[in-house]
Image: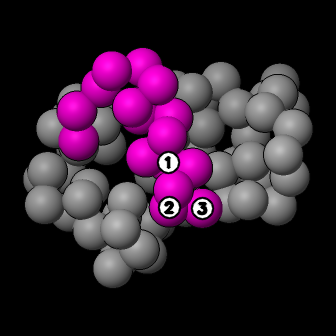
């Protein structure tokens, strides 16, 4: 899951700070999310899924299908 978050971010040439701003957390907190040192709250997972136009299941590694349920 954590590698997937990093890959999505890097594919869009975004910084950790960009995503931290989106989630209203510090860059250090987002870095811990991405490294797996800190669990990502479900509300943040939903925001990330909407931002990347994918499903939470994809972010969690439960499916390889990138499409959103919407």
Residue 38 to residue 42: above or below = below
Magenta stretch? Answer: 1-16
Cβ–Cβ under 8 Å for marks 1 and 2? yes
Q: Secondary structure at mark 3?
A: loop
Residue 49 is left or right of residue 24, and the answer is right
Residue 29 is left or right of residue 65, and the answer is left
Magenta stretch: dominant secondary structure: helix
Residue 13 to residue 47: above or below = above
Which residue, given by chain and number where applicable, does mark 1 sit on? 5
Please tell me which residue is depicted at 82% across the width and 61% down the height of the picture: 62
Q: CA distance from mark 1 to mark 3?
A: 6 Å
Q: Secondary structure at mark 1?
A: helix
Cβ–Cβ under 8 Å for marks 3 and 2? yes
Q: CA distance from mark 3 to mark 2?
A: 4 Å
Residue 2: give its label: 2
Q: Is residue 48 magenta?
A: no
Residue 61: give its label: none
- Look at the image and tell me whether residue 43 can be seen: no
Q: Residues within 10 Å of mark 1 (few under 14, many from 20)?
A: some
């Amino acid at each position: 899951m954590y590698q997937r978050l990093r890959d999505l971010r890097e594919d869009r040439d975004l910084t950790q700070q960009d995503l931290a701003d989106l989630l209203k957390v510090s860059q250090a907190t987002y870095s811990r999310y991405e490294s797996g040192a800190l669990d990502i709250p479900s509300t943040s997972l939903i925001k990330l899924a909407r931002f990347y136009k994918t499903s939470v299941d994809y972010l969690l590694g439960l499916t390889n299908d990138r499409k959103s349920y919407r």
